Amino acid sequence: EVGDFTGIALRRAAARGVRRVAFVGMVGKIAKLAAGVMMTHFHRSQVDGELLAEAARQAGAPAPVVAAATETATARHFFEVCDAAGVTGPLVELCRRAARACADHAGGALDVSVTMVDFDGERVVATAGCGRAG
């Protein structure tokens, strides 16, 4: 449990010799991590709609899903659009980008996996990871 202080937790884990980190969260936090925002408190950072759209395009999502990414102010709405359309590719891409950003933030010292769960915390909807650099 790192709450809003993901960046600090990652650096401290790496400094103490931890080699693997698993981050489990909901779309809002994961979208912020994917954008490289390691202080994720909702008052301090906003979700980047263009990042959501980029992830949707890269995953080959249908046009309404891509459009929803930039037409919404919340990652939750984007998640709901993906979920209703049965499209998980953009969510997996967000997890992949978040894992890479977290690993990079820790200087490449960590294997990072990122898993997205639904808003009840009961269903895994996407997961991705990246290995240590070098």
Image (spheres, rainbow, N blue to C red):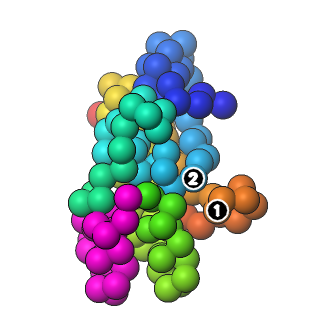
* Mark 1 surroundings: few (<14), some (14-19) or many (≥20) residues within 10 A: some
Residue found 48% across the figure and 51% down from its top: 28
| Residue 72, magenta (yes or no) | yes
Q: Percent x, y for residue 133?
A: 32, 36
The residue where tag 1 is placed is 118
Q: Residue at 47% across / 38% down in the picture?
A: 42
Q: Residue at x 50, y 25 (%)?
A: 5
Q: Is residue 112 left or right of residue 66?
A: right
Of 115 and 81, which appears nearest the observer? 81
Helix, strand or loop at label 2? It is loop
Q: Residue at x 38, y 26 (%)?
A: 106
Magenta: main secondary structure equals helix
User: Residue 4: x percent and y percent?
Assistant: 52, 30
Is residue 42 depicted above or below 81 in this figure? Answer: above
Q: Are marks 2 and 1 in contact (CB under 8 Å)?
A: yes
Q: In the rendered image, which residue does mark 2 sit on?
A: 26
Q: Is residue 91 above or below residue 22?
A: below
Amino acid type at image mark 2: Met
Quarter-wise, where is residue 39 in the image?
top left
The image's mark for residue 67 is none
Amino acid type at image mark 1: Asp
How far is the residue under mark 2 from the one under mark 1?
6 Å
Percent position of residue 6, x then y: 49, 29
Q: Which residues are magenta?
A: 52-73
Q: Choose between 1 and 47: the one closer to the eye.
A: 47
